[in-house]
Amino acid sequence: MILTPEQQALLNGEKGETMAKVVKTLVMYGDAFDAERMVPVTSEYGHTVISFGLKTLGPVYDLYQKLLDEGLLSKQKFTADPRPLDKNVPSSFLEDIVFNKLMYSRQASYEKQLEEMGLLDEDSYTCTSYLPQVGNVPKQGDILSWAESSAVIYANSVLGARCNRNSGILELMGSVAGFVPEFGLLTDEGRKAHWIVEVRCEHKPEAQLLGSAIGLKVMEDVPYVKGLDKWLGTELTDEATTYLKDFGAACASNGAVGLYHIENLTPEAKQQGEGLIREDAKVYVIDDAELQRVKESYPVIWKDPDAKPALCFVGCPHMTLKQLEDWTDNVTRQLEENGRTKVTVPTVFTASTPVIKEFNKTERAGKLADAGVVVSYICPLMYMNNPLCKKKPVITSSNKLRTYTSSRYYTEAEILDIITGKEGSR
């Protein structure tokens, strides 16, 4: 790798041994992927995936403290993934003991470290930092040092920024140094599609299910998706970006996709068209039968597959304001149709704090609370990491949450039927 004189000086210890180790880490990372140089991080804000004070991550917090003691802060203010705890989310006495005493006992001290490192503000804990209410919206062409699979794929695909799928520590190193190795999704060649995905469904495909099918098929490759603009249109409206948020999260978690192109819709696809497709690209055809096959392939790992759901999570990634509004309307309408006033399964909708604050200004917030639904800022995945919670029969419309936990996936329509007590919904 060819370093600039300034980068070489840092590697040689000009600003101390700790900074030299930061740069050495980035050099080793780049060498592993044949990067030829470093490029500056140009986005206004960063984003970190490590937001949880797990007791077992002592070395991570020691590393943060070492950087802080040396005055090596992030070159940018940054947002972070969601917090793991909220007293309003249903849990038992024993689950709370595990959460507070055994799992997230370092939460308060770690959040203090994040503030000192450069956290944007106390409301900046979310996996959807790119939503306008949060404000961490990279521009097309920006170079990022981010970690968080669903945020990275959104930034790459919908916004046209450039970021590799970094780990939390490598993201931190790039943020402190202010530069990252140039390879993969940071390059023009690395952003070309390995797959052509032809969507031939008769009905609008469920975002989480379509993303899952593509992720499972292409793994870490880049897909160029044709036919989806039939339902999403050719402009990045609120409806389209919300769909792509959930679609991308499933691509990134069920596979390892860091970038996708949607024909006639996402910025690079609109600008370059089929010029983004590699000559040796493979073809994957998706129809309704294929989506059904994928859905039926998901394992049910509950101890009792026929158990009544004990908890429902909607919002992984965090919900948009429009999703909160639409879900509220659908829940209240269907409860009334079913002759009920409250949801029949304890239900939690998750969204960022800024989105929740906007939602709470509307009449819908009271209606949703009256229906018995909790709105929370937490990360459902962090909740489900509790060994006691893993034993619960939890349902979700998130394919990301299904992949990483014991929760069981249902489509949004199925979830709505279940939580509103529609007869025969299970």
Image (cartoon, helix red, strand yellow):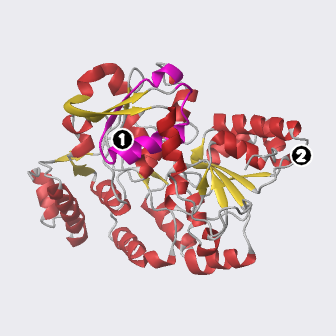
**The residue stretch that appears in magenta:** 202-231
Secondary element at tag 2: loop
Residue 234 appearing in the image? yes
Label 1 packing within 10 angstroms: few (<14), some (14-19), many (20+): many
- Disc marking residue 43: 1
Q: For the residue marked with disc 2, what is the amino acid? A: Thr
Rendered view: 220 above or below 72? above
Q: Position of residue 410 (x, y in %)?
A: 62, 48
Q: Position of residue 399 (x, y in %)?
A: 53, 49
Question: Residue sitting at 44 percent across and 57 percent down?
Answer: 49
Q: Position of residue 69 (x, y in %)?
A: 36, 72
The residue closer to the viewer here, 79 or 367, is 367
- Within the image, what quadrant is residue 402 found in? bottom right
Q: CA distance from mark 2 to mark 1?
A: 47 Å
**329 magenta-colored:** no
Left or right, 338 with respect to 239, comes to right
Asked if the residue at tag 1 contacts the one at tag 2, i.e. Cβ–Cβ closer than 8 Å, the answer is no
- Within the image, what quadrant is residue 141 found in? top left
Question: Residue sitting at 47 percent across and 63 percent down?
Answer: 114
Work out whether mark 2 precedes mark 1 in sequence or the reverse, and give the earlier one: 1
Secondary element at tag 1: loop
Rendered view: 173 above or below 58? above
**221 magenta-colored:** yes
- Disc marking residue 341: 2
Q: For the residue marked with disc 1, what is the amino acid? A: Ser
